[in-house]
Image (tube, rainbow, N blue to C red):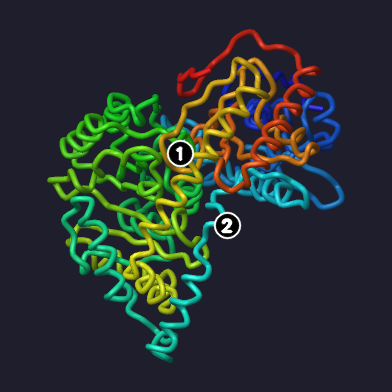
Amino acid sequence: MPRNQIELDRTKERALYLQVADQLRRQIEEGDLAASTRLPASRTLAKKLGVNRITVVNAYAELEAEGLVTTRVGSGTYIVGAKSLPDATLSALQAQWRSPLPPRPPATANQMITEMMRLAHQPGVISFAGGGPASEFIPVNEFRRALNEVLRRDGAAALQYEEAIGYPPLRQTIAQLLRQQQIKVHGSDVIITAGCQQAVDIALRVLARGENSVLAVEEPCYLGLLNLASSRRITPLGVPMDEHGLQIDKLEQVILRHRPNLIYVTPSFHNPTGVTMPLERRRRLLDLADQYGVPILEDVSYDYLYYDTPPPPTLKSLDTADLVFFAGGFSKTLVPGIRIGYLVAPESLQNQLISVKQTADILTSPLNQRALDLYLRSGHFETHLEQVRQAYRHRRDLMLAAIERHFPAEVQWHCPQGGIYLWVEMPANGPTAIELYLTAINYNVAFSIGSTFSAGGLFAHALRLNFVACEPEEIEEGIRRLGKAWKELLARHVPARHSVSGLGVTIL
């Protein structure tokens, strides 16, 4: 057992597994845990700390990723010890620990998410955890007809290699859609990508290269962006949000202190919070980026999914300094599986972006590109959007009503005016989202854990709920199960001393 008792504070936003890792790391650095010391079995330490075993497993994995412990199959987890590391490695680790920048996202996040998703996909589980649209609204018949028509019309050409930049008619069609949003763009400005995720990745690889690259992101932030940043060895810096999105004054402090290479933002129906940035704040963001010469990567994945009125103009349409990179796609609004997105970028960087795209995967499926182009030109897209907007608004309202009936009165949330997610903050003096998840799985209901969307390990008590992917009757039942899991967990939970809110938006 570690010589100094590990003390967990459930009132803190920092996830419990990170608290365990922090305290073990400190004991290793201070010499309280010597090299070759065997750490307690994860189940033993979890029982002593009163946490789930996955908390300790993730803490050990975090330390192993840092090179401080090693796992020997069939034997256990042992301290490597800072003194036993090579001098160069030790210096690099110490430089990282002493850096004024926050640590990169935990290396174990993907492992934890993979396990959570595995549990969420078990038979009988009502899952609010996914990131996709409702399957029943995917226009299967229309796409079948489009695919068949393309094969009849183009034959083998639809199955051959295409230019890396994309199928020219589709680029023209997307440019036409964007011009309807007052964006000055031509087909030649559009790069077709394998979903919006690849558009974001390409922009990162061109604009934020190298170990010292810094990316300013919303806090909380799209999980896929955090994973991309981690894989590219880019440090994401979380900028606090409020009910109107990214806080511009806080962003300026980050720019002055850390000089980020890029600002990533989802101004409309933000993932995971659902917040939309108003027009005046968008203008302030553009002015700030122009003042300091920092480019912006704008993600518009959810812009078409508004429920009452369209969102304010995009940053790209307001951009006069040519600083905005514009990434979008059709996974959330139309057909996830065809994996088609797009990137609009300043002309001066197009060659570099296309080169990165070509290196990544050579091309995006020519057949899917041609079928999507045919579908978009058919006029069905707007009819499809009207249908899903109506259905999704109804499902949002059903979930909010169910939360009022089954969740504790102290719960906090923001009502999204579009998109597909509801961000819920449970009482901070109660169980964490991870603890709730592990109990909820026993009730056959799942959700996304808030802390996985944080660059700084915050939002330990937050949940992201996808309110569109389940049938209406499943929404009511799923929220009822979540409420029941919460009550069971709360009955054996030691009350904390005070409450903290991330976004600070109290609706109930």
Q: Callout 2: 10 Å neighbours few (<14), some, many (20+)?
A: few
Horizontally, is 460 left or right of 392 in the view?
Answer: right
Q: Which mark is residue 70?
A: none
Q: Residue at x 44, y 43 (%)?
A: 419
Q: Residue at x 30, y 69 (%)?
A: 354
Number of marks in picture: 2
Q: Amino acid at mark 2?
A: Glu
Q: Residue at x 58, y 28 (%)?
A: 401
Residue 288 image-quadrant placement: top left
Quarter of the image containing the N terminus?
top right
Q: Amino acid at mark 1?
A: Cys
Residue 379 image-quadrant placement: bottom left
Q: Can residue 325 be spotted in the picture?
A: yes
Farthest residue, direction top: 497
Horizontally, is 249 left or right of 25 in the view?
Answer: left
204 or 84: nearer the viewer: 204
Residue 271's spot in the image, x, y percent?
A: 46, 41
Q: Which mark is residue 221?
A: 1
307 or 192: nearer the viewer: 307
Q: Is residue 434 above or below residue 201?
A: above
402 or 112: nearer the viewer: 402
Residue 438's spot in the image, x, y percent?
A: 75, 36
Q: Residue at x 16, y 50 (%)?
A: 322
Residue 42 image-quadrant placement: top right
Q: Tell me the element at label 2.
A: helix
Q: Give the mark, 2 or 1, whose residue is nearer the N terminus.
A: 2
Q: Tell me the element at label 1.
A: loop
Q: Which residue bears the numbered disc 2?
A: 136
Q: Is residue 331 above or below residue 472?
A: below
Horizontally, is 387 left or right of 290 in the view?
Answer: right
Residue 196's spot in the image, x, y percent?
A: 41, 57
Residue 319's spot in the image, x, y percent?
A: 17, 45
